[in-house]
Structures are given as structure tokens and as C-alpha cells.
Image (spheres, rainbow, N blue to C red):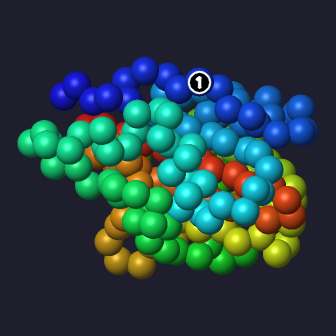
Amino acid sequence: MDLSFGLRPEPYDLGPDPDLATWLAELGASRHRVVHLGPDDGRSHGQLCWDVLEPTGLLAVHCRDCRHGHGGPRDPARMDAALKIGIPSGEIVPWTAATLLRDLVYRTGEGGLRPVAEAVARGLVDLLGPGADWRANGYAAYREGATGNVHWAPVSEATFDAAVVGIGNGHAVVVVATGED
């Protein structure tokens, strides 16, 4: 299947902390990850995620009349609705680490990078502060948080996707993992 997001997106602003930015860039280097860290400029979770994904080609808004069954949102309001799960404070680090690291199609091991992904996630949680609002689109990456079936609301035209969006303390972060089988 020839999907429009086969090309790597342009690099994003990965924030003021050089170490955190380096690790975010490293974990986001996969063509199956999109990572953004920047200022909170008042956008909602959905608008922020939409604006980060739009230049990557992961959204199907350009495809109005094709026969490919797109499951992703068609506008920022629907993106906001897809990000309906508020992540409990005790689960933000493992949820974000899983989204930064896990393959959404094959349940292969995470190798030795899990401690790195958790350290990066802790850095993001510290940066955004205890009052941050963290949202996800479901359990495609963080399977251990699911009760029953692993489910999610799509945020892209990929077959599988997982999104974590956090806003707080003047900062905003978007992590999106995608997968094709």
C-alpha cells in the first residue's frame, strides 16, 4: 500500500533542554514516530496534535474522494475527540515511554532502550509540571493500561497509531507512533 507518509517529516523544535532534546530526537528518529516539544501557545490538545501531524502527511484530509477507508479525524475538533483519555498521573511515564518506544504491529522486545524512554518521559513530566493535562487516543502502545481489548481512536491514516499529548507549565509535547502491517 502506498501511503502518503512514507517520507520523513522536517525536524521539530525539541525544546530548551539539550539532553532531553537529544534523546527525544534519538527516540523520534524512527520514521514511525513523530515527536514535538515546544511552547504552550494556547492550542487545545487536538489542535496541537493536528498542527504537528498535518505537515507530515499522516492526515488524510487531502484525500477527499479516494476509496481508501481512512479512519483518522478530518479536523482539529475530531482530533480533540480522539484524544479523549486523560492519562492518570501515575501512568504518564510508562504510557509516554511505551509510545516513544514500542512497535505497534509486532510485539517484539523493547531491548535496552526502555530505561532511556522512561528517563525521557520523566524529563517531559518534570518539564510540564504536576498540573499538566496529559491525553491519549487509547492503548495501542500502552497495552498494560488497557482493560479488556486494546483499543484506540485513530489520529492518523496509519493502520495503527498511538498518541500522547501533554500541555502544562508553558510547554506542550506531542508523541505519535504509527505502524503498518
**Where residue 113 sits in the image (x, y, percent)?**
66, 37
Q: In this rendering, would 73 be left or right of 139?
A: left
Q: In this rendering, would 38 be left or right of 162?
A: right
Q: In this rendering, would 71 be left or right of 96?
A: left
**SS category of the residue bearing label 1:** loop
Pick whichever, 86 or 150, lies toward us.
86
Q: Residues within 10 Å of mark 1 (few under 14, many from 20)?
A: few
The quarter of the picture where the C terminus appears is top left
Snapshot quadrant of residue 86: bottom right
Q: Is residue 148 above or below residue 177?
A: below
Q: Amino acid at mark 1?
A: Glu
Q: Residue at x 66, y 77 (%)?
A: 88
Snapshot quadrant of residue 164: bottom right
**Where residue 32 sits in the image (x, y, percent)?**
47, 34
Q: How many marks?
A: 1
Residue on which disc 1 sits: 10
**Where residue 78 sits in the image (x, y, percent)?**
40, 65
**Where residue 33 sits in the image (x, y, percent)?**
53, 37
Q: Which residue is at the far top?
A: 7
Q: Residue at x 63, y 40 (%)?
A: 35
Residue 175 seen from this side: yes
Pick whichever, 43 or 53, lies toward us.
43
Pick whichever, 144 or 141, lies toward us.
141
Q: Residue at x 90, y 39 (%)?
A: 17
The quarter of the picture where the N terminus appears is top left
Residue 90 seen from this side: no
